[in-house]
């Protein structure tokens, strides 16, 4: 009975976490604190820790905490302990979730609970978007802000790229389930979920994140490939493909601001625009940051600068290269691979790549395509953002990574996919 109560708190905390992630991120640390305290009080780890070395899925789940341990080791040769400990605090979810999931009862969540958590996340994406749209409407009426429903004016307390990533994954969850729902001839669910996809896709266009739009296109292409793999039938595949292409083309016309940002970015890259000419353009800033950061990686490739010194080294390099707009904003490397490589050297980038590649291989082999999609979405987005430097990125990855791993690749979820979550 006592363990059942603790398991219920674990589930409800996870449900709230998935819901508030795209709604109000400031609620996430208290929720994680409740989840952690509940785990400590439950004492379940007293019986499950010995199983880590006998049950492979537990050991593999715990493996995801290794990246955090490498960051912790990076404190041994750092000089800026203040920033280092702050960075470890931001990244703490990388350690907490693998430990809790690896030492939980098995299965961690049953199939119905998994469905509820996914539903909470999708609902959170919808409600979060409505809040942001309502805020933009209010701002437009009061102050007449230009383009209030696009990009930074829309996102308010979010980063557009992170929000686009959340919504794209939500679309991926819905698309993954549509074939099964359609096959069971549930017209109401099919229509409802199809409208959710259309709405979230429109919202991603409003967010106008260049990486987000590319990820959205990739996700929809992958869904068509999945239909082909599952032999959904030529008429259905053609019909769905035409609908997706039509919607993408329609939204590009309805929301020209989004495609305008992509076209502008391509033009600037083609003309090799400099930061002096375009001090506030994100694409030009990234290009200059990557150039400087890669130069620094070459100097610190073996063990990196240390967990706490990476920011100081970047700021100093920005000043030396005259990147004053970037320096004033205190920007990171805007690429998690480069950021981790610079901070921790070969051990850090090696562990980051392994944390993505090993489960990607496993999910592909076991035909767990939703987990594979999540990994691909995240792996692509951290090419343009250092997402482990903010809780919005860390918590999204840390939670859903072990959640999907436990649901898909642990013994209860292993085996060939059948077009459903488990």
Image (tube, rainbow, N blue to C red):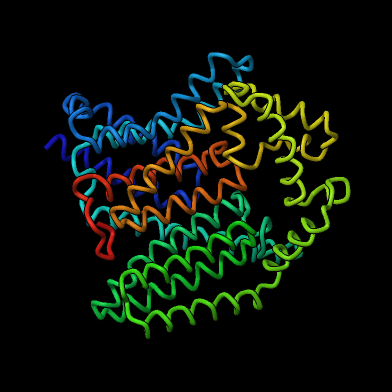
Where does the image place residue 254, in percent across and percent down from the top left? 65, 77
User: Which quadrant would residue 231 be assigned to in this image?
Assistant: bottom left
Q: Residue furthest bottom?
A: 235
Residue lying farthest to the right in this orientation: 277
Q: Nearer the viewer, residue 115 or 419?
A: 419
Q: Residue furthest left?
A: 1
Image quadrant for the N terminus?
A: top left
Answer above or below: position of 4 versus 67.
below
At 79% from the left and 57% from the top, the residue drawn is: 268
Q: Nearer the viewer, residue 130 or 58?
A: 58
Residue visible at 37% across and 85% down in the picture: 235
| Image location (x, y in percent) of residue 12 | 30, 46
Residue 79 seen in this snapshot: yes
Front one among 110 and 372: 372
In the rendered image of this protein, does residue 208 appear above or below residue 361?
Answer: below
In the picture shown, does residue 365 fall above or below 295?
below
Q: State the residue at coordinates (33%, 67%).
A: 177
Query: Which quarter of the picture shows residue 332?
Result: top right
Left or right, residue 319 beside residue 219: right
Q: Does the rendering let one see residue 44?
A: no
The spot of residue 412 in percent (x, y) is: 19, 48
Is residue 316 depicted above or below 274 in this figure?
Answer: above
Q: Where, by quadrant of the figure, is residue 249 drawn?
A: bottom right
Quadrant occupied by the C terminus: bottom left
Image coords of residue 8 (percent x, y): 23, 43
Between 154 and 216, the one lying in front of the other is: 216
Residue ID at (54%, 21%): 85
């Amino acid at each position: 009975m006592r363990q059942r109560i603790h398991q219920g708190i674990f589930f409800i905390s996870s449900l709230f976490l998935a819901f508030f992630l795209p709604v109000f991120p400031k609620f996430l640390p208290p929720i994680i604190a409740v989840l952690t305290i509940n785990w400590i009080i439950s004492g379940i780890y007293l019986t499950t820790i010995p199983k880590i070395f006998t049950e492979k899925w537990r050991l593999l789940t715990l493996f995801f905490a290794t990246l955090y341990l490498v960051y912790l080791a990076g404190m041994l040769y750092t000089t800026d302990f203040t920033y280092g400990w702050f960075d470890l605090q931001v990244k703490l979810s990388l350690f907490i979730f693998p430990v809790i999931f690896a030492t939980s009862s098995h299965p961690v969540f049953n199939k119905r609970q998994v469905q509820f958590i996914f539903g909470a996340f999708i609902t959170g994406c919808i409600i979060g978007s409505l809040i942001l749209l309502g805020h933009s409407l209010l701002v437009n009426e009061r102050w007449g802000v230009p383009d209030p429903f696009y990009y930074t004016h829309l996102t308010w307390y979010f980063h557009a790229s992170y929000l686009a990533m959340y919504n794209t994954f939500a679309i991926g969850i819905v698309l993954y389930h549509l074939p099964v729902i359609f096959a069971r001839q549930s017209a109401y669910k099919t229509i409802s979920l199809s409208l959710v996809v259309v709405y979230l896709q429109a919202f991603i266009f409003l967010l106008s994140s260049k990486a987000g739009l590319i990820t959205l296109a990739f996700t929809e292409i992958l869904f068509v490939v999945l239909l082909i793999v599952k032999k959904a039938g030529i008429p259905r595949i053609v019909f769905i493909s035409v609908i997706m292409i039509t919607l993408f083309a329609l939204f590009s016309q309805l929301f020209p601001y989004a495609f305008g940002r992509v076209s502008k970015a391509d033009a600037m890259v083609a003309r090799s625009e400099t930061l002096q000419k375009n001090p506030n353009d994100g694409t030009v800033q990234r290009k200059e940051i990557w150039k400087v950061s890669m130069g620094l990686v070459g100097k610190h490739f073996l063990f990196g600068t240390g967990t706490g010194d990476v920011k100081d080294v970047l700021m100093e390099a920005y000043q030396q290269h005259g990147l004053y707009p970037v320096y004033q904003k205190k920007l990171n490397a805007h690429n998690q691979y480069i950021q981790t490589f610079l901070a921790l050297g070969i051990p850090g980038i090696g562990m980051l790549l392994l944390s993505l590649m090993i489960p990607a291989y496993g999910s592909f082999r076991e035909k767990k395509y939703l987990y594979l999609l999540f990994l691909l979405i995240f792996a692509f987005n951290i090419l343009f953002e250092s997402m482990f430097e903010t809780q919005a990125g860390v918590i999204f990855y840390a939670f859903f990574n072990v959640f999907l791993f436990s649901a898909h690749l642990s013994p209860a979820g292993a085996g060939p996919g059948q077009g459903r979550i488990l």
